[in-house]
Amino acid sequence: MPRNPLPLTTLVILILIGSMWVSPETARGQMLFNRGDCNTDGVSNIADVVHGLGILFSGAGPANCADACDVNDDGGNDISDPIYMLGNLFSGGPNPPLPDDCGSDPTADSLDCLVGPASCPPPVEDCDNGVDDDGDLDVDCADSDCQGDPACAPPLSFSLDMYPIIVDQCTFCHGPPSNFANLDLSLEAGNDPYARLINTPSIECSSYDLVEPADAQNSWLYRKISGTHIDAATAAGCAVVDAGTQMPLGPFCCLDQATIDLFQEWIDGGANP
């Protein structure tokens, strides 16, 4: 980052017991910054020293980017920071620690950077961490940057995602006229297939509901299509002979793993209608 020291005509430093400010708690993410650029104008010079002193002693604070004003990277903002900056600008002192070219703070501390210089690009929005990472006031999936991100995909639903599979694979047996296992999953005569599944005990092993929302492992539907129903019946003390075979039956068996995983995701996600 360019350093542009201005001519120094008068400099008076009052050596005080350093006071410290800490940036307020915020749900916004950490902006990229350049250490020493306390006024976040993109250049490190005497103006940053003046700005830092104003925040400390003249009520000009808090800093938009407290991390940038922490020139010596000791985790605080106090008189040692403008002194460090003056030494760098005019006495051949060391450069401030990194970052010096639009970076994040490598040191864990309580300081933050809410507004970085305009020359630094905003961070990329993380779509599922509850933080406004890029500082545009939109969090996670409300941010347009998250459009199409898997974390922001709408939850699976029975009507849109699962029932078309059931119609294709299951209603031949679980529908009129057979209604195998007394389970009608058709839409005929006002039947509600979703209601027939949710929190309904299985007649093959009543310890399990056909679908237990948010718990695929305890849902008999998932156990039957995944072929783990025998183990489930044994664990619950149900008669193995009553547990039947993996579903769908016969030539329809078995669902591919991606479809089985889809049912598991739907159930574990709350079995939305």
Image (cartoon, rainbow, N blue to C red):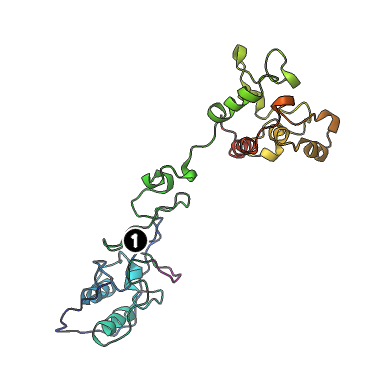
Instruction: Give the vertical position of 71 relative to 65 (above or below).
Output: below
The residue depicted at 74 percent of the width and 19 percent of the height is 180
Q: Check the image and name the residue furthest to the front.
A: 251
Looking at the image, residue 84 sits to the left or right of residue 177; the answer is left
Question: Which residue is nearer to you in this view: 114 or 153?
Answer: 153
Q: Mark 1 falls on what kind of element?
A: loop
Picture quarter with the C terminus: top right
Q: Position of residue 265 (x, y in %)?
A: 60, 39
- Identified at 62% across, 36% down, the residue is 267
Magenta stretch: helix, strand or loop mostly: loop
13 sits to left or right of 104 = left
Residue 169 seen in the figure: yes
Q: Amino acid at mark 1?
A: Leu
User: Which residue is found at the position 39% from the left and 68% from the top?
Assistant: 111
Instruction: Give the percent coordinates (x, y) of residue 64.
Output: 30, 64
Residue 155, position as x, y percentages in the image = 52, 37
* Residue position marked by numbered label 1 in the rendering: 114
- Packing grade of label 1 (10 A; few <14, some 14-19, many >=20) is many
- Magenta stretch bounds: 104-110
Q: Is residue 109 magenta?
A: yes
Residue 239 visible? The answer is no
